């Protein structure tokens, strides 16, 4: 772990580097007053919000799981429960999400989590050449091929996102 001193090094970037997955790190100045971490990232990076994905931890029938959906919309709790073979899903407690992943809210990455959880990526990602997900801290997003994200996280794909307003 000699690369820990790298200014943008996080468990997420370390996981990508260890797997030999090509990615582009996009850093930006995070504004603590921003209302939406994901929409802030899209705006600051000048990238359409349909390509920037947020990572959300949910509780599906008492089991923690991860949903990855475009920041332009929301997570459909019934759809993620169904995708994981469950009956009911609710957003996980924020403190539980932070403990489980090792990341702070607004910086939770689907990659390099302290303890991995079943992951579902919204099917819209499959139509895109690259997507952006949190790089493991506020103000850092990682651009990568969605197929690589699926491979590294063992993610399922399903229509779990809802269109935003």
Image: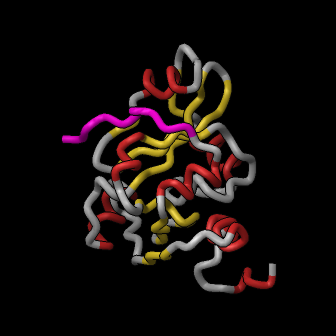
With respect to residue 27, does 117 lie above or below? Answer: above
Q: Nearer the viewer, residue 7 or 33?
A: 7
Q: Quadrant of the N terminus?
A: bottom right
Question: Is any atom of residue 143 visible in this view?
Answer: yes
Quadrant of res 18? bottom right
Q: Quadrant of the C terminus?
A: top left
With respect to residue 35, does 20 lie above or below? Answer: below
Give the residue displayed 52% in from the left and 23% down from the top: 81
Q: Is residue 124 magenta?
A: no
Question: Is any atom of residue 108 visible in this view?
Answer: no
With respect to residue 134, does 157 lie above or below? Answer: above
Image coordinates for residue 121, horizontal then vertical, percent: 48, 43
Give the residue displayed 68% in from the left and 59% down from the top: 112
Q: Residue furthest top?
A: 87
Quick check: 114 left or right of 84?
right
Give the residue displayed 39% in from the left and 29% down from the top: 76
Image coordinates for residue 6, horizontal then vertical, percent: 66, 85
Give the residue displayed 74% in from the left and 53% down from the top: 114
With respect to residue 98, does 22 lie above or below? Answer: below
Q: Nearer the viewer, residue 16 or 68?
A: 16
Q: Nearer the viewer, residue 158 or 142?
A: 158
Q: Is residue 164 magenta?
A: yes
- Identify the magenta region: 156-165
Image coordinates for residue 125, horizontal then vertical, percent: 39, 49
Quick check: 144 left or right of 84?
left
């Amino acid at each position: 772990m000699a690369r820990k001193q790298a200014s943008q090094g996080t468990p997420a970037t370390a996981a990508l580097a260890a797997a030999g997955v090509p990615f582009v790190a996009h850093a930006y100045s995070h504004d603590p007053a921003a209302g939406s971490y994901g929409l802030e990232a899209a705006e600051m990076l000048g990238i359409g919000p349909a390509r920037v994905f947020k990572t959300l931890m949910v509780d599906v029938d008492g089991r923690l799981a991860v949903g990855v959906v475009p920041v332009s919309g929301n997570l459909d709790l019934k759809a993620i429960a169904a995708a994981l073979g469950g009956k009911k899903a609710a957003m996980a407690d924020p403190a539980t999400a932070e403990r489980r992943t090792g990341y702070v809210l607004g910086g939770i990455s689907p990659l390099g989590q302290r303890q991995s959880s079943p992951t579902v990526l919204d099917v819209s990602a499959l139509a895109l050449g690259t997507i952006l997900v949190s790089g493991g801290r506020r103000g850092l997003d990682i651009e990568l091929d969605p197929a690589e994200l699926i491979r590294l996280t063992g993610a399922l794909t399903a229509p779990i996102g809802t269109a935003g307003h």
